[in-house]
Image (spheres, grey):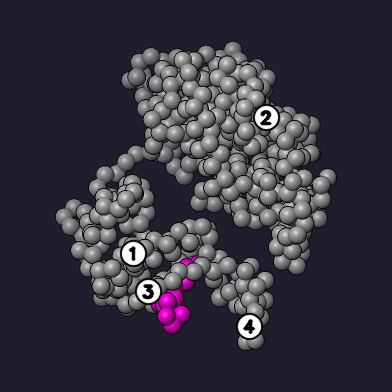
């Protein structure tokens, strides 16, 4: 039986469903009434177009788990892939045996053209285990097809459990990535008149914001103008805002953005963003019925009000997910403009694929422009998330030096961490960094400790002149002072 995979999209249903039996508005209302989330996978028989069970029931069960739309769609693709594998072996998902599952693991991790890694397989095996648990609970199967071996071993589990893939940049590497790769300069810092890249100020500002705040990609790339105080506060002032819906696991935390990083964004907003918003204004005007057009921004409460799908709605900015942020507009200089800081030629926020494309283009340029002055490039191209790792390592090292000065003895360093955890919770550098990063547990932040002794990352003042173009010290001293509740100049002397 061949199977087709679809996913729920209530907006498409509302705006484009044409049926004499049910209007689009009624169908969308039914989805809301039944609590069917956007992104919920739907499996249909290719010939009869009837639902395929128990996959559809499993998909509906997953829709109640309050998962992101992208996550639901990803899970739907994983199960469709496994169903296709079973079809190729002459079975369906319910008749899967342990040998079928082990064969699927081998195909995914060893035999296919581009095998997936441990982390990706861990997600797929966990989802398969969840599906068969659902099948047993609902009476489709008497037991799971995979036995548990001695000492709790599961044949589907990844063979090797890897730690965090922490990759960080030195100052020279970061400058080369930002200015040559993203900004289109030559390695000697001169303007490269042959550069044909698009929006270099935007991409440089994005890297400065990522590094200066330590935020995850989905947090800094979706930031809104009011959250950085752009258009509200004087240019270049430090900003502080709360993330929730765009944070990992929806965990609320405060993101602090130092002055130099905000200044880099201000430069992009002044020099480049007007051209991008003007280019996309016509597209937004044509699509305004499908977008969230706000009529009021309350900067004190952090709430916005406007029209979405013909209905007046009001949202807390921190509770706005990425998909809603992307379609949020306001009436600006060129007509309708995106409320997000970063925009592309469509007039809307760049998506994950766009930022990936900017990064890949930067990597190719960095390799092409490499000469004897170029800092050492890693074997694998950098990721945006590496800027978050760099933030964590530099801030951790800096706070340790501020609190206790340099400590060459590794055993003494370890004793010092133990002392902090027991007696100095508030000023413990590890816990400060953990809170800044929004880690669910300080245990995750411990993975960075083995890197804080890396001499390649030790220099006199952490992050002096990294972000922005002022070349002045302040960025990390400013973050540290903010963390301790002190004046920015109080830490300059190492007190």
CA separation in Å, label 3 and label 4:
26 Å
Distance of mark 4 from mark 2, alpha carbons? Answer: 51 Å
Q: Quadrant of the N terminus?
A: bottom left
Question: What separation in Å lies between label 2 and label 1 (alpha carbons)?
Answer: 46 Å
Q: Nearer the viewer, residue 249 or 57?
A: 57
The answer to which of marks 3 and 1 sits earlier in the sequence is: 3
Marks 4 and 1, the one that precedes in the sequence:
4
Evaluate if marks 3 and 1 touch, with contact meaning CB atoms under 8 Å apart. Answer: no
Left or right? Give the position of 310 relative to 241. Answer: right
At label 4, counting other C-alpha atoms closer than 10 Å, the crowd grade (few under 14, some 14-19, many 20 or more) is: few
Q: Which residues are magenta?
A: 40-52
Overall secondary structure of the magenta section: loop
Decide: marks 3, 2 in contact (CB < 8 A)? no
What x and y, as percent, mark residue 238? Answer: 69, 31
- Whether residues under marks 2 and 1 lie with C-beta atoms below 8 angstroms apart, the answer is no
Q: Which mark is residue 264?
A: 2
* Side (left or right) of 159 relative to 350: left
At a point 34% along the width and 39% down the height, the residue shown is 163
Element under label 4? loop
In which quarter of the view is residue 262 placed?
Answer: top right
Q: Mark 4 — residue?
A: 19
| Residue closest to the far front | 194
Depth-wise, is mark 4 or mark 2 nearer the camera? 4
Q: Kindly identify which residue carries mark 3.
A: 2
* Among the two numbered marks 2 and 1 on one chain, the one whose residue lies closer to the N terminus: 1
**Quadrant of residue 289 in the image?**
bottom right
Q: List the residue tagged with mark 1.
A: 82
Task: Look at 47% across and 44% down and name the residue there.
Answer: 440
């Amino acid at each position: 039986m061949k199977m087709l995979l679809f996913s729920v999209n209530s907006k498409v249903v509302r705006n484009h469903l044409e049926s004499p039996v049910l209007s689009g508005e009624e169908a969308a209302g039914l989805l809301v009434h039944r609590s069917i989330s956007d992104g919920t996978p739907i499996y249909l028989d290719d010939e009869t177009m009837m639902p395929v069970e128990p996959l559809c029931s499993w998909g509906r069960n997953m829709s109640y788990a309050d998962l992101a739309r992208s996550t639901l769609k990803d899970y739907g693709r994983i199960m469709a892939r496994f169903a296709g594998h079973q079809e190729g072996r002459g079975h369906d998902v319910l008749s899967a045996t342990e040998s079928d599952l082990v064969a699927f693991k081998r195909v995914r991790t060893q035999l296919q053209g581009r095998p997936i890694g441990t982390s990706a397989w861990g997600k797929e095996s966990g989802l398969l285990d969840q599906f068969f648990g659902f099948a047993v609970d609902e009476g489709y199967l008497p037991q799971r097809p995979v036995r548990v071996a001695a000492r709790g071993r599961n044949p589907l589990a990844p063979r090797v459990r890897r730690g965090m893939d922490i990759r960080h940049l030195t100052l020279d590497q970061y400058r080369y990535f930002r200015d040559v790769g993203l900004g289109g300069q030559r390695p000697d810092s001169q303007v490269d008149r042959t550069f044909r890249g698009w929006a270099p100020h935007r991409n440089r500002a994005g890297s400065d914001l990522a590094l200066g705040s330590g935020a995850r990609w989905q947090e800094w790339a979706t930031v809104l103008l009011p959250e950085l105080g752009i258009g509200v506060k004087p240019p270049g002032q430090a900003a502080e805002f709360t993330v929730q819906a765009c944070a990992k696991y929806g965990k609320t935390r405060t993101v602090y953005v130092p002055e130099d990083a905000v200044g880099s964004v201000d430069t992009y907003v002044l020099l480049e963003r007007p051209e991008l918003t003007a280019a996309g204004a016509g597209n937004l005007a044509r699509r305004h019925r499908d977008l969230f057009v706000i009529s009021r921004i309350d900067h004190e409460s952090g709430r916005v009000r406007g029209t979405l799908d013909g209905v007046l709605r009001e949202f807390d900015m921190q509770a706005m997910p990425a998909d809603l942020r992307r379609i949020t507009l306001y009436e600006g200089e060129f007509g309708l403009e995106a409320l997000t800081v970063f925009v592309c030629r469509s007039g809307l926020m760049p998506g994950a694929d766009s930022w990936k494309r900017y990064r890949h283009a930067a990597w190719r340029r960095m390799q092409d422009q490499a000469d004897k002055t170029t800092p050492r490039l890693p074997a694998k191209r950098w990721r945006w998330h590496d800027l978050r790792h760099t933030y964590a390592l530099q801030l951790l090292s800096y706070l340790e030096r501020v609190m206790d000065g340099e400590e060459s003895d590794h055993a003494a360093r370890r004793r010092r961490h133990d002392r902090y955890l027991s007696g100095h919770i508030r000023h413990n550098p590890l816990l400060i960094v953990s809170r800044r990063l929004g880690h669910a547990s300080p245990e995750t932040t411990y993975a960075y400790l083995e890197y804080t002794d890396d001499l390649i990352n030790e220099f006199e003042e952490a992050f002096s002149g990294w972000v922005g173009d002022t070349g002045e010290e302040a960025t990390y001293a400013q973050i540290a002072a903010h963390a301790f509740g002190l004046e920015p100049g109080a830490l300059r002397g190492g007190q």
